[in-house]
Each structure stands twice: as structure tokens, then as C-alpha cells.
Image (cartoon, rainbow, N blue to C red):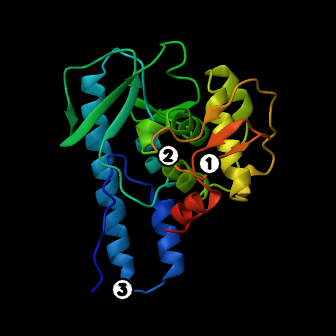
Amino acid sequence: MLTCRLPNQVLAPGPTVLNHSWNRNPDPRRLVIRERCIASMFLKRRRSMVFLRGIFAGHPHRIGYLTALDHHGLLIRPVKAIQVASAYRPRSKALAGRPLRVIRENPLTILAGTEPLGPSRVATMERALLDAASWPKLVGGASRIAESLAAVMAIKGLAELAHAVSAEAGYRRIGSISTALSLAVGHGLEPEPWRTLVDLDTTAQHEHGWVDRTWGVAWPYPVSQLEAAVAS
């Protein structure tokens, strides 16, 4: 039986995501379901944007981190919380029935690397990756970062954006994961001089840790552990 399975996310993916599914399984019976899914997803997105506009009216904010990664179609596992970067702390703890998590951020960097999404702004794919890699604890650890990077073929201007928003540590984590896992997104990323190590994942410990001296990143576990996360 064919069913319309909507992702558990606030910012539903656009038609591109559904088109990929359609191309893989061009069953004529799926056509009507596909169109209904698209209509339902955009209705859900419109509702969410109205709620966001009301909560953050007059306050710069960026839909980012896991929510933005989900918006760009980079995650396999669903996201429950809505993560928004802002200098403003609203009273609301939920949005459209989903937990709302506001990450305090410098007002000067909130809108860097964003694009319009209704009355709000959402992190670009590059900014969303830097958000996640800069604060692994906020996104569930390095496995979520690797999951996202595995879905990206190429990115542009990542190093420049990292400098603009002071996300050099995040850039190094992205470079280390991409090269260690031989991901396509790693092509074109250039290591930069570093003085001190950054931890890849502070949420985990392992007796077989090692140091990526090219990127200056301390891994708490073997590469195979992230390979398994990407494969799953």
C-alpha cells in the first residue's frame, strides 16, 4: 500500500526531495500521492513561518543547526526540535507543537550565510554545516555532521564564511571528517595552519582515539565508527 510519509520536521523539504524519490520508483500510482505530499508540505511550511514571524517579530534570527540541515535535505533521521539562532530569548518553548531551542548568538553574525524563507531567514547549506560542526553537542555529535556531509557533493566559500562567523574550528572538523571518510564534499577544502587541537566530538570517549594532524582535530574513536554512522 502506498502512503504519504511526511518527514518529522518543521521546515518540510521542497519538491526536489520528492522528485528524487519519484525518479527512483516511477510507479504511476505514486503520482497523486506525490502531489498531495508536496501540497501538504508547503502548507506545513507556511504555518510554521507564521508562528516564527510572531515569536521573533522585530528580532533578527536564523533557522539553523539541525533544523536547517533537515531543510536542505541532508539528514536521514528526523529532527524533533526547532533550532533558531538569535540574540533574543522568547518566552515560547514550543513552535507548532515542536520543542523550540534558541541558541544565543552575536547579533553581528546571526544573518551571515542565510537566505530568505518566508518572513524568516534560514542558514544556507554551508552555514548550516558550519553551525553543526562548530557545536557538535547541539546536533547530537559528529555522527550527525558526517551524515550531513555524506549527502553533499560540493560546497563553495566555506573557508571564507568560516572566517566571517568565527567558525574556524567547525571548518576544521568538516575538513577532517570529509577527508577521513573520503567524502566528495572534501575535495577542494584546504587545511589551514593551526596551533591547538580541537576535539572532534566531546560527546564521546574511546580508548582508540587518534589525532588528525593535517586538520588539527583530535578524534576520540577510530574512523570506522563514523563510517558505520554514515553507512546506516
Give the residue at x 37% y 35%. 83
Which mark sits nearer the N-terminus, 2 or 3?
A: 3
> CB of mark 1 within 8 Å of CB of mark 2?
yes
- What is the x, y in percent for residue 179? 74, 52
- Residue type at numbered disc 1: Gly
- SS for callout 1: loop
Residue 170 locus on image (x, y percent): 61, 34
- How far is disc 1 from disc 3 in space, using C-alphas? 50 Å
Q: Which label sits on residue 209?
A: 1
Tell me the kind of residue under disc 2.
Gln
Earlier in the chain: of badge 1 and badge 3, it is 3
- Residue that numbered label 3 is attached to: 29
Q: Which residue is mark 2?
A: 205
Quarter of the picture holding the N terminus: bottom left
Q: Give the secondary structure at mark 2.
A: loop
User: Which disc, if any, is residue 82?
Assistant: none
Q: Decide: is 134 above or below 60.
A: below
Residue depicted at x 81% and y 39%: 190
